[in-house]
């Protein structure tokens, strides 16, 4: 099944244009969106989340996105923007709990909502922070809380914009492994903007390479090539085989070194 | 209200019920104190004819108006904080009080008493819209910019009021006195109207409590949580403006209540809208009845301080404390 389908999709933002002629993202996929700054990665993600006006077709689980009510839309997809911010004081537990807002049927979070939140706090080592105010946390801790919040919705489609900003290595790997299991278990879809190529290559199956608002390549892991990656990202990429695992060596392009 | 503010069985619930009980006791206690003290002390259980008349015709409406104005301003402050996404917003810091007063003074001088309320509302809405648009940038709103925009609106409105006072000098004395803030002009009609406004506004917030909390996030997070953010902001702004306008039209400019009351409640750990809305109403009422009691009794020989002077002095000190101690919040280094 296709969770997301795009056809003749176009988003305009001032002078910038993001165009994707055709793209199908289906159940069970871990999709990494790669590209240099200003290539349209965040625009793509926020448009997929229904936050930008677009032309063409964008379907979520077979339904044109703008015809779905907010509730139907955000029960199925959970979006983590790049710079999450909270202007009033709330404790960590409650911030994570609010991720379940679209699931509310009445005016109150239920016992089940509280239990799910407890479970995520445990899973991501956030239990000790549960009573702390969000505003008092460090950048990395905040990002972990917001990630847990995004996952708490248990939506099949996850759209994560640089979710590992400032997150320490251990928790990056913990999260990304959880994401992989989550996607498999729910037959869901995870679309993630990343800058860390090694993390992407290690855990993701599909790679969307964006540059200047166009989709330069849509590749499976086996199809990744040093030249293509290097060309899109403007760096020299070399694959290194080590103990059955593919590692990446990254350097500046030759011409820029001097 | 008791059953609806508590989310189903959860730890912390008992604490909230206890606090609710405490606040109700506080309100009752302050109410009794405020009713029985003043220029003429009243023994409320042994009243003669004069005492009864003072109680029902002067004291009671005044104390009720004070309490309701406190509740209204505190609630307006809380709602402005959701719209402006920071805890420093209130009717005074956003300039809503001043622009509302400008509307009211204009109506008073040009059209007469009937148009005071609608003009005060229009003034408040215009001022708030200006502050919101000046302060918001690409879906976020910085507290410092909001305060600066509030100063702009405040300065402009105050200057315009001064000009109007200068041009129409015969009614100056009453305007000056009214603007300083006080509850001398209390009537049961005013009490009834304000009570209706406070009740409806509080109910509005209570019914949407989880959504109110989500407005504190960045726009993208709030919108992608399924909150009708823009509609909610408009409604909150309107409700807050309405509460401000009614308060200003009846009792003049009384500053900082909407800042102090929610802040103290948050400081002792009440953070969610479902709890804050009813608590802010009760605490705001107690706070203002007490402030009015002090204003009536501090000076010897039955002289009265304008209550606005009292709350502004207190508010100024409180704001100073925030500036010194809470820089992170203020500059949003957080």
Image: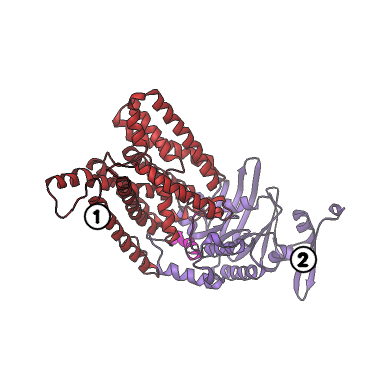
Chain colours: A purple, B red
- Which image quadrant is residue B113 in? top left
**Most extreme residue toward the right, as rendered?**
A258
Question: Looking at the image, is A226 positioned above or below residue B322?
Answer: below
Residue drawn 54% across and 52% down? B324
Could you tell me how far apart the alpha carbons at marks 1 and 2 are, in whole angstroms? 76 Å
Q: Which residue is mark 2?
A: A248
Report the disc number at residue A101: none
Question: Looking at the image, is B76 positioned above or below residue A163?
Answer: above
Magenta stretch: includes residue B273: no
Report the chain holding disc 1: B
Foreground: disc 1 or disc 2: 1
- Which image quadrant is residue A230 in? bottom right
Same chain for labels 1 and 2? Say yes or no. Answer: no
Q: Position of residue A16 (x, y in %)?
A: 66, 43
Q: Report the front residue among B224 and B327.
A: B327
Q: Report the front residue among B51 and A143.
A: B51
Magenta stretch: includes residue A102: yes
Q: Position of residue B83 (x, y in %)?
A: 46, 47
Q: Is residue B272 left or right of residue A58?
A: left
* Element on which disc 1 rests: helix
Q: Which residue is mark 1?
A: B32
Q: Position of residue B87 (x, y in %)?
A: 47, 52
- Magenta-colored span: A84-103
């Amino acid at each position: 099944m296709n969770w997301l389908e795009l056809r003749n999709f176009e988003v305009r933002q001032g002078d910038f244009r993001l165009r994707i002629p055709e793209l199908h993202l289906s159940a069970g996929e871990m999709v990494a969106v790669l590209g240099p700054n200003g290539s349209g990665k965040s625009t793509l993600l926020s448009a997929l989340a229904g936050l930008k006006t677009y032309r063409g077709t964008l379907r979520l689980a077979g339904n044109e996105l703008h015809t779905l009510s907010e509730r139907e839309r955000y029960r199925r997809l959970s979006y983590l923007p790049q710079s999450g911010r909270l202007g009033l004081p709330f404790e960590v537990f409650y911030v994570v709990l609010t991720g379940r807002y679209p699931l509310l049927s009445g005016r109150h979070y239920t016992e089940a909502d509280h239990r799910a939140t407890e479970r995520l706090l445990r899973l991501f080592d956030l239990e000790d922070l549960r009573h702390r105010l969000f505003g008092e946390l460090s950048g990395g801790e905040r990002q972990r809380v917001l990630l847990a919040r995004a996952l708490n919705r248990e939506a099949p489609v996850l759209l994560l914009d640089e979710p590992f900003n400032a997150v320490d290595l251990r928790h990056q790997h913990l999260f990304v492994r959880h994401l992989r299991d989550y996607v498999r278990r729910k037959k869901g879809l995870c679309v993630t903007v990343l800058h860390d190529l090694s993390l992407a290559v290690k855990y993701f199956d599909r790679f969307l390479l964006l540059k200047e608002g166009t989709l330069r390549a849509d590749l499976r892991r086996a199809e990744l090539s040093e030249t293509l990656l290097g060309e899109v990202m403007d760096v020299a990429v070399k694959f290194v085989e080590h103990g059955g695992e593919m590692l990446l060596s990254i350097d500046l392009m030759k011409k820029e070194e001097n | 209200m008791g059953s609806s503010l508590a989310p189903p069985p959860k730890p912390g619930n008992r604490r909230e019920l206890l606090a609710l009980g405490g606040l109700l006791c506080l309100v009752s206690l302050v109410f009794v104190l405020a009713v029985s003290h003043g220029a003429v002390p009243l023994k409320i259980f042994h009243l003669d004819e004069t005492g009864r008349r003072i109680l029902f015709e002067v004291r009671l409406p005044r104390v009720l108006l004070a309490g309701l104005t406190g509740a209204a301003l505190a609630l307006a402050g809380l709602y402005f904080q959701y719209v402006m996404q920071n805890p420093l917003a209130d009717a005074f810091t956003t300039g809503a009080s001043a622009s509302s007063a400008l509307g009211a003074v204009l109506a008073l001088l040009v059209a007469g008493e009937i148009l005071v309320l609608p003009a005060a509302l229009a003034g408040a809405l215009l001022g708030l819209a200006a502050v919101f648009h000046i302060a918001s940038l690409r879906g976020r709103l910085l507290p410092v910019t909001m305060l600066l925009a509030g100063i702009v609106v405040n300065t402009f409105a105050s200057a315009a009021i001064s000009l109007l006072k200068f041009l129409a000098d015969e009614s100056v004395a009453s305007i000056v006195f009214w603007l300083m803030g006080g509850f001398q002009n209390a009537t049961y009609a005013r009490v009834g109207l304000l009570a209706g406004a406070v009740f409806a506004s509080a109910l509005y917030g209570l019914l949407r409590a989880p959504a109110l909390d989500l407005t504190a996030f960045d726009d993208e997070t709030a919108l992608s949580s399924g909150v009708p953010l823009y509609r909610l902001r408009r409604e909150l702004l309107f409700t807050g403006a309405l509460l401000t306008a009614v308060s200003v039209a009846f009792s003049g400019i009384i500053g900082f209540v909407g800042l102090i009351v929610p802040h103290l409640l948050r400081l002792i750990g009440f953070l969610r809208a479902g709890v804050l809305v009813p608590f802010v109403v009760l605490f705001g009422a107690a706070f203002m009845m007490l402030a009015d009691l002090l204003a009536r009794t501090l000076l010897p020989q039955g002289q009265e301080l304008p209550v606005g002077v009292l709350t502004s002095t207190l508010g100024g000190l409180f704001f100073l404390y925030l500036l010194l101690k809470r820089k992170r919040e203020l500059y949003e280094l957080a």
